[in-house]
Amino acid sequence: MRMGGKGGNDKSYRLRDTGRRPGGVKRPADRTETESPSEVAVAATATVAVGDDETFDVAAVSESRVVAPNEAATKGVQQEGNRCVPVPLSDPIYRIMHALPRSDVLEIFKCRFGREECERAAAYFDGSYMKNPLRQLRLQLGCDRATGLHLFFPKLHHHRGTLRLIDLSRNDLDENDVATLTQLLELRGDDAPSSGASSALEVLDLSYNRRIGNRGALFLLAALRHNDRIRAVVLKGISVDDSGAIAVAPFLRQRPLPRMPEDDEGVTFQETSSRRLPTFFLNLNENRIGAAGTVALGKGLPAHVSLTMCKQRPFCNKKGSSK
């Protein structure tokens, strides 16, 4: 086919013979056994002939393999032995829980699950995180026990011997839930474990559970008074005021010296070396502790106890307006 261009120059456009039919599909004789017409599409390369002798490529389109969507991946099928098990890849709850390529770490950050989402998350937990030991767990689901957080309590009890870090912040826990967790995780250091597995917990974060309050903080620190394994307790924004701070202060003065981790799998929450003894860290930031509570907490602290109380918003007595 010949076409006339600008300036009277005639150019010949030829389609290089690539052994393929128009439309980018191979002839049946050229296809391999592993290829199907819907899997491979090849772009042809056009060449331009100037004059009769010299040729050069105007658009060199390299062969690009366009693979059709895999039917197994579309349906979400996972091979387990000789059978295929459906995997809900389209479910955002499943994708959130499997964002990390590790079976010993599960992290859900700043979510707000309803009852149905909690049930699905608990089912995925059973399928993916109950066979292997779990060492770090973050469940920021934004719900309370009745909504669905209770579904995860038996799983915490199952992994109590291997969990090093538990983050249940940004939920709606109260003091009764704190008592339940203390019992399920066997955090009392003076109690003999009900089974052979004792608690290995080193870091516990219950921040921004506003309903824990003074009674929840008091119950937790009283239960941990003989636990020398735990290294850090984070209780930011749980509505602790002066009365709660004064009540928990004696338990800080009685804290035992934390023991060194027995292996190399400890949580790297604090820098610990042979020159520095391990410390116990308590974070009470963003509560309602005033001057009286601050004085009580800071009096007589042992050298191995570290305490922070920033961004406090204590209750202020409003003066009555004179009429």
Image (tube, rainbow, N blue to C red):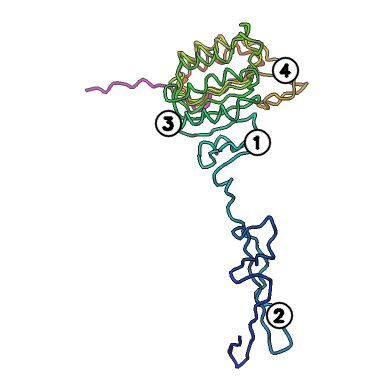
**How crowded is the residue under tag 4: few (<14 C-alpha within 10 Å), some, or many (20+)?**
some
**Residue 21, magenta (yes or no):** no
Mark 1 or 4, which is nearer the eye? 1
Left or right side of 276 for 6: left
**How crowded is the residue under tag 1: few (<14 C-alpha within 10 Å), some, or many (20+)?**
few
Q: Residue at x 52, y 23 (%)?
A: 152
- Marks 1 and 4 in Cβ contact (< 8 Å): no
Mark 1, secondary structure of its residue: loop
Q: Which residue is mark 4?
A: 260
Choose the circle earlier in sequence order: 1 or 4. Answer: 1
Disc marking residue 82: 1
Question: Which amino acid, by three-letter code, is at mark 3?
Answer: Gly
In the rendered structure, which segment of residues is drawn in magenta? 307-323
Which of these two is toward me, 225 or 143?
Answer: 143
Mark 3, secondary structure of its residue: loop
Question: Which amino acid, by three-letter code, is at mark 2?
Answer: Phe
Q: Which residue is mark 3?
A: 114
**How crowded is the residue under tag 2: few (<14 C-alpha within 10 Å), some, or many (20+)?**
few
Q: Is residue 96 above or below residue 218?
A: below
Q: Which residue is mark 2?
A: 56
